[in-house]
Image (spheres, helix red, strand yellow):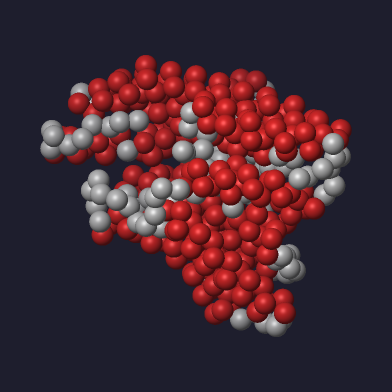
């Protein structure tokens, strides 16, 4: 039973959440029941397949890695770079295997045994913890808190990506009834908003626009068909994914946790930097903090370059290409990452050009509207690349029997 995939799932979930809601209203966390609920819904999601054992094995593997590095860094007070990089590589190794597996076993067959739902988001959690242990931001990793954070079921399938320090702070905080009432109201609203996004708007876009136009664009590629499929896919992607995120945040609210958000009106962004401050924010901020900023710092400390423009551009390329590779080892995901890197680099160059030429562009509703329109369309071009529709068009031209897109 995939999380949040059907309205019936929410019937079961709603009934299971009633004791937690009552306990929170009475000022109790009811942690034993939260743990039992997590185990039950993980079992509903993964039981009956080999992935339940992959999930358990992966958790044990990550626990050993994190606890070992905690012992090495905190208890032994050692900080050798070789050990740190080795631990990071071990932590991401299962995810790398999952991503590389299709290259060696293409086709419709079964994926990697490690390819269970949510492996990426759990990996991001542990990598962030290892880096923060090295930085001295995490001084201790209590086993019970770590396992609950790792397997926190509302976010296990599609995020948002939380941080251990923030989560544990909420986990240990006493229940304040007034604060929980506010969370409860917000949680119910977000779940219903998620229903609107995913089960109504997303469904209508998929059934009555995207599915048909994607096939038409593949068989009869034209500017109109391809453009229409681009907007259809971009809007479907947003409403479907934002719906999932709202479900995860809303359910977490009902359990007493105020998780970080993933979306903040991304299509009102005025530039590409602003867009990545609004779109899939927990992933964007994760890559910013643990890839881009650390790479820039390494360049500066190692004195590999004194040119901040070059350092930033290399950081953008590495950051966005890695994000593209994370989505999958196909040319259009990699091109998606490269395209966004070029947008980031291009926007920085535009800002420097304005400053050098001393161009004074007025900031009013008209210039804001133009900026939003340009950013919106540049972003939707990236969604077209990401959708794989251009790949279907190319492959269909080569082989008319190539499978048609099915969203």
**Going 39% across and 54% down the picture, which residue do you hit?**
50
Q: Closest to the observer: 247 or 302?
A: 247
Q: Closest to the observer: 95 or 232?
A: 95
Where is residue 365 drawn, in percent x and y? Answer: 65, 20
Where is residue 161 drawn, in percent x and y? Answer: 60, 48
**Going 58% across and 36% down the picture, which residue do you hit?**
245
Q: Closest to the observer: 364 or 197?
A: 197
Query: In this view of the protein, can residue 23 be seen by the observer?
Result: yes
The image quadrant that residue 25 belongs to is top right
| 63 shown above or below 372 | below
Where is residue 100 drawn, in percent x and y? Answer: 34, 59
| 125 shown above or below 36 | below
Is residue 117 shown left or right of residue 332? right
Is residue 382 shown left or right of residue 361? left
Query: In this view of the protein, can residue 235 be seen by the observer?
Result: no
**Going 81% across and 30% down the picture, which residue do you hit?**
181
Where is residue 350 drawn, in percent x and y? Answer: 54, 42
Is residue 275 shown left or right of residue 99? right
Q: Quadrant of the C terminus?
A: top left
The image quadrant that residue 291 belongs to is bottom right
């Amino acid at each position: 039973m995939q999380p949040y995939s059907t309205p019936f799932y929410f019937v079961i979930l709603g009934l299971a959440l009633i004791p937690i809601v009552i306990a929170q209203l009475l000022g109790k966390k009811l942690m034993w029941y939260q743990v039992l609920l997590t185990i039950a819904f993980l079992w509903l999601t993964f039981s009956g397949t080999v992935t339940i054992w992959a999930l358990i094995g992966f958790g044990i593997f990550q626990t050993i890695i994190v606890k070992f590095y905690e012992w090495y860094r905190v208890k032994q007070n050692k900080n050798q770079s070789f050990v740190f990089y080795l631990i990071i590589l071990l932590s991401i190794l299962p995810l790398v295997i999952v991503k590389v597996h299709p290259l060696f076993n293409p086709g419709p067959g079964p994926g990697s045994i490690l390819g269970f739902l949510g492996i990426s988001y759990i990996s991001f959690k542990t990598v962030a913890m290892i880096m923060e242990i090295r930085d001295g931001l995490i001084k201790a990793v209590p086993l019970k808190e770590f396992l609950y954070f790792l397997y926190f079921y509302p976010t296990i399938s599609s995020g948002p990506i939380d941080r251990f320090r923030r989560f544990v702070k909420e986990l240990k905080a006493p229940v304040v009834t007034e604060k929980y009432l506010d969370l409860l109201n917000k949680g119910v609203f977000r779940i219903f908003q998620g229903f609107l996004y995913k089960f109504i708007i997303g469904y209508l876009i998929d059934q009555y626009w995207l599915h048909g136009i994607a096939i038409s664009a593949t068989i009869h590629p034209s500017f109109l068909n391809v453009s229409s499929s681009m907007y259809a896919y971009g809007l479907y992607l947003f409403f479907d994914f934002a719906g999932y995120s709202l479900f995860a945040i809303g359910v977490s609210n009902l359990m007493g946790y105020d998780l970080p958000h993933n979306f903040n009106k991304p299509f009102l962004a005025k530039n590409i930097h602003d867009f990545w401050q609004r779109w899939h924010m927990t992933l964007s901020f994760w890559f910013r903090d643990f890839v881009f900023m650390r790479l820039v710092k390494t360049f500066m400390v190692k004195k590999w370059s004194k040119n901040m423009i070059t350092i930033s551009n290399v950081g953008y390329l590495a950051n966005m290409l890695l994000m593209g590779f994370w989505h999958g080892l196909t040319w259009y995901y990699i091109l998606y990452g490269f395209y966004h890197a070029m947008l980031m680099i291009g926007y920085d160059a535009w800002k420097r050009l304005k400053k050098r030429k001393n161009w004074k562009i007025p900031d009013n509703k008209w210039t804001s509207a133009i900026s939003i329109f340009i950013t919106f369309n540049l972003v939707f071009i990236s969604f077209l690349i990401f959708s794989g529709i251009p790949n279907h068009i190319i492959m269909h031209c080569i082989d008319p029997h190539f499978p048609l897109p099915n969203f």
